[in-house]
Amino acid sequence: MSFLQYLINGISIGAVYAIIALGYTMVYGIAKMLNFAHGDVIMVGAYISFSATNYLGVPAVLSIFIAMAVCTILGIIIEGLAYKPLRGTSSLAVLITAIGVSYFLQNAAQLIWGATPKNFTSIVTSAPISLFGGQLTITGEVIITIVASAVIMLALHFFTTKTKIGKAMRAVSEDRDAAQLMGINVNRTISTTFAIGSALAAIAGVLLCSTVPTLQPTTGSMPGIRAFTAAVFGGIGSIPGAMLGGILLGVIETFSKAYLSSQFSDAIVFLVLIIVLLVKPAGLLGKQVQEKV
Amino acid sequence: MAEKYSREMVEVISKNLHRQQDLGKVPVLDVRNLGIDFGGLTAVDGFNMTIGPTEISGLIGPNGAGKTTIFNLLTSVYQPTRGSILVNGINTKGMTTAKVNRLGVARTFQNIRLFTDMTALENVKVGMHNSIKCGFISSLLRLPPYFKAEKEANKRAMELLDFMGLADVADTKAGSLPYGVQRRLEIVRALATNPSIILLDEPAAGMNPTETEELMHQIRRIRDTFQIAIFLIEHDMNLVMNVCEGIVVVNYGRIIAKGTPEQIKNDPAVIEAYLGKKEEE
Amino acid sequence: MKKLFALLMAAVMVIAMFAGCGSSETQQPTADSGETQGAEATGEATENAAAAGAIKLGMCGPLTGGAAVYGTAVKEGMEIAVEEINALGGLQFELKTADDEHNAEKAINAYNSLVDWGMQIMAGPVTTAPSTAVAGECAADGIFMLTPSASGVDVIEAGDNIFQICFTDPNQGTASADYIAEHKLGTKIGVIYDSSDAYSSGIYEKFKAQAEVVGLEIVCAEAFTADNKSDLTNQVTACQKAGADLVFLPFYAVEAAQVLTYANKIGYEPLFFGCDGMDGILTTEGFDPTLAEGLMLLTPFSADSEDEKTQSFVKKYQEKTGIVPNQFAADAYDVIYAIYQACVDGGVTADMTAEEINEIMVEQFTSMTFDGLTGAGMTWMETGEVSKSPMAVVIENGVYVGKE
Amino acid sequence: MRIKNDRKTQLTNFLTYALVIVAFVILQYMSEGKMLTKSMQGYLIPICVYIVLAVSLNLVVGISGELSLGHAGFMGVGAFTGVIIAGIFRDTIDNEILRLALSMVCGGVLAGVAGFVVGIPVLRLRGDYLAIVTLAFGEILKNIFGNLYVGKDINGIQFAFSSEAIKLAEGGKMILKGPMGAAGIKKIATFPVAFVLILITLFVVLNLINSKEGRAIKAIRDNRIAAESVGINVTAFKLKAFVTSAFLAGMAGALFALNYSSVNASQFNFNTSINILVFVVLGGMGNILGSIISTTVLYLVPELLRELQDYRMIIYAIVLIVVMLVTWSPKVKQMIQVVQVRIKDLFKKKDKKGGSVNG
């Protein structure tokens, strides 16, 4: 029974990683950049939602939409100011500006909301489900998070395969130059991707903080790196891969804490990652791209 | 036939074989029933051919016929699904591209692959990598062997550049050289590895007629000077017919004709598959 | 292009270096250019004081980054105390703060910048790892150091002039185990601790050692690290599965809030027992105080305390920052007053050198008794360790209720 | 025969050495004469350490073209090895310089070994996958050091992963205490030694770059397939670059640790790796002199911004973004080129007939 409980715990945190990883992987797939500021956009999203509910008295569900709107605008601004001017140069240059943006968001958040952590009020009000006479407990957050991540994954999948702008995104991710020649506005497509990725980040922020209530300026950074790991784990650029990677990472982390060593769980998680990448160099669901000779 | 050799062994064997090859006993390249599938799709199948020392051969065929794939198989960029490749009598199965090169196969690329950030001279010196005899410690500590080796390398690299008429651009970044010059530089870099056969992938592509004419002379001169075999893919029929002694024609990954330029010109299968199609356009 | 940039950078570097030298040189004798900065932060009182010649106190702590909550609390607490003291007339203080990002290397840089400014007494750092590094410097330079909240043993071991106003970690671990055993609060003990944090693992180690001595059974000890502390559900689950009826939580309120929230969700209701870092949990913005009902902690400070001094401090702190002070702020407030008392009693004046002050302070601290917010009748041993009695409080109806 | 390009490289190398030596002489003179403020004095060794780290990382990122996000891990290996070695020989080797040198060499060697182990995945992975593996190794190393306990008593040295496992005899001393790290380290790092380490690093890195090994490494970066086609063993050379880089980072780490009285594992985290990467990218990929200058400037910027108090880090972030945009943006580059051409035109007014045919 404890095995099941750990499994559920793992899936729960894994689903949060998965949502963050979805944003990561989408931006990576299209813009080919590691957006290290993604985790901090999540933090901003959570703060917006928190402020809306606690200071303005907005209902919790509505606050998510406010957070999404703010984060979308933020994402577009960041992209336009810090990333767009570097389009076409080394991806490392963009990586560094992303780090700069990350520092900026963290410190700006500290100036606005202060360093003292806020305890995020969960948006989920339903009571936890208790099974097997209390042996197994599934909280409302777990269910919401899992459902939300699955819905987002499916929606993204549908979006990228069925809609015009989604198809444009895929075209840009396959071959930017060819897409440009086919009349696709690459710059606008990338901006749209950032907008969607940031909106996702807002949802991820709210769900992350519903599961893990501590909200402070650095809240996003560690889960951000974990989610990046998850995205690579599943095959970066792949939407189902991000989902699978996130959940597996959560489960592995939980099991290594529960059954191996809580002290060395970080090392164990990363060791598993390395082994997986050695066996499957492009991640679990990633495409192995053969360089054309 | 043994399949795995240490690097040292390969060198020893290849040296001995170079000697035998001088006697003209072993073909430089002996390809038997070569084939490769990409996920169920057969790209090359039943490819057989031998190339003797100092022979100039051509490989022609319509676009997408599998010519470059054959080059990639010969240089171990791809591992064949079937068949074997013997370079100077040694089976290259399972070897890396680098090892095959050390056995004596050098190549150029259809889409030029120079080290664009380096000068022409440095490009050639990279090609000479395995023949520069200077240890890691020597170069790290700048011991006398380093200076001696570098001096010799510079001298030989300049000679090679000069041979192809590129001495003037030795100090220019490879990326900023004109297209035709880049193609020739790639040949020099390949020559710098001391090969016994050199594979040229569309060496005349993008060259104007004058440059192509010059290239034809140079290809013959390379063979005569270095006494090596040359195997080339080319769409310029004038070049192929004038330079090559033997020609192989492929279509859909299979050989459809083989012979001297005269034979190929008159082969009905070739005319249909290749030249005929060309006329239609 | 690259060269151009390199040259530009080189130029900036040269200018920066000379600016660095220049500014601190000019600052030292006249001591006013830097002062206005510090004074702005501390308010009007300090501004008047600056002219009269104030004793320069330096504080360094994490003002940015993940540990900024502790650094900023200490900074605010100290600023209030300095304002109050300066308003009294008499002995004047001038406080300058420097960010150490909770990093030993940056702490040394911060410390050096304070020394360049002319710091005479070190009132900091805040967290253990930077304090250990800075303590070594203070010992070597002969600058008196009194840390509000760095509770590691290594800190005071660095020298004879390093003092703490908070309990040492082992002290807390041992005291907690004793208290639990003495009052028979639990039979099966679960522990959750941060194995990457010096404070948390320091307490845990001593707790474990003492538990053996007093016969407490630890049924599970679950660790987390700074990198994975965003998810503590497993550790709680593990304690539940192990059937622990008392869970010892030697870490800060931030993580404790998570543990309590999750335990509540899964309906796990053991007795939770915390340390001084737990203080502040009731006032964490957004935290539902009913979840902390029945939580017990050993702490020297409670913001709900009825005494006048605490009330006035809490009120000022709230006016200044809008939030209720935690134990870090209270410790910081006490640090300034302890220094003030020692300075007054020892006859310290602003024109003394740091070394002279150091001697007086060491002498005073080892002999004086101090009453502060975080304890009455505090005395210090020669090692620098404070002796004050931890107070056990239990949260009932959303307020601290003292237990003996 | 004189080769122009070689001369240019020699000149740049000479300039690099000259800058370092001149800076050292001036600073050492000022330091001896007590002309430096305590802050300036305090920056000297860490800046040297970060220069070594940036230059060595540049070997991997700039020259070898592989993104590494775990450089701090190697620094940590060196740091902890150095602290342990210095702790063990504290009583046996009296000469501090000798003890420091021994610690640094041991730190370097162990970091090199770690680099070799980490380097093996380099054989299989490329690009961002390699980046994440280096990140992962960095975190693993940090996790291990954060739980390592080392004690020393008359019976010898004991290693363990928990504090209870070490039972020290009377008079024994803990050198390393897991998450609490090492405290009470005797500070034996000196500025001249740090300077010598920079010289060694420059010597190793510059000589490596301008040798056949360096050419091979650069060739792999520029075009892996072409490099293979001329007989270069890609794996071996990437590994050589990686191990050399780790070795130097280890030496720097040992020096770093012995410059402070305490050190703990969390100092060698992902953020530190990222900071070093920022130094490298801003200084220019493969540009060693650039790394040295950008490290110095970027280390000093947040320190000199201390007066800004709360706004310090936010200003630093903005500076970072703006500098990146100015130095890397194609538009800005174009503008600078136009200006350069105009300036050149002003100086030499040659007629501009017969533009190149080949284009």
Image (tube, coloured by chain):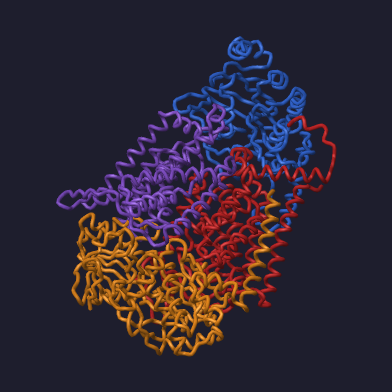
Q: Can residue C79 be seen in this view?
A: yes
Q: In the rendered picture, chain C carries what hue?
A: orange
Q: Specify whether D2 is left or right of D137.
A: right
Look at 54% across and 57% down and name the residue there: D275
Which image quadrant is residue D51 in? bottom right
Q: Specify whether A251 is left or right of B226.
A: left
Look at 73% across and 52% down and name the residue there: D9
Q: Can residue B85 be seen in this view?
A: no
Q: In the rendered picture, chain A carries what hue?
A: purple
Which residue extends farthest left? A133
Q: Specify whether C174 is left or right of A87.
A: left
- Assign the C terminus of chain A to one quadrant of the image: top right
Q: Position of residue D177 (x, y in %)?
A: 41, 70
Q: In the rendered picture, chain D carries what hue?
A: red
Look at 63% across and 68% down and name the residue there: C20
Q: Where is residue B7 in the image (x, y as percent from the top left)?
A: 59, 44
Report the number of discs.
0
Nearer to us in this view, B31 or A167: A167
Q: Specify whether D351 is left or right of A154.
A: right
Q: Where is residue D232 in the image (x, y as percent from the top left)?
A: 61, 43
Q: In this view, does C88 lie above or below D75?
A: below
Which image quadrant is residue D256 in? bottom right
Chain letter for the part of the structure drawn in blue: B
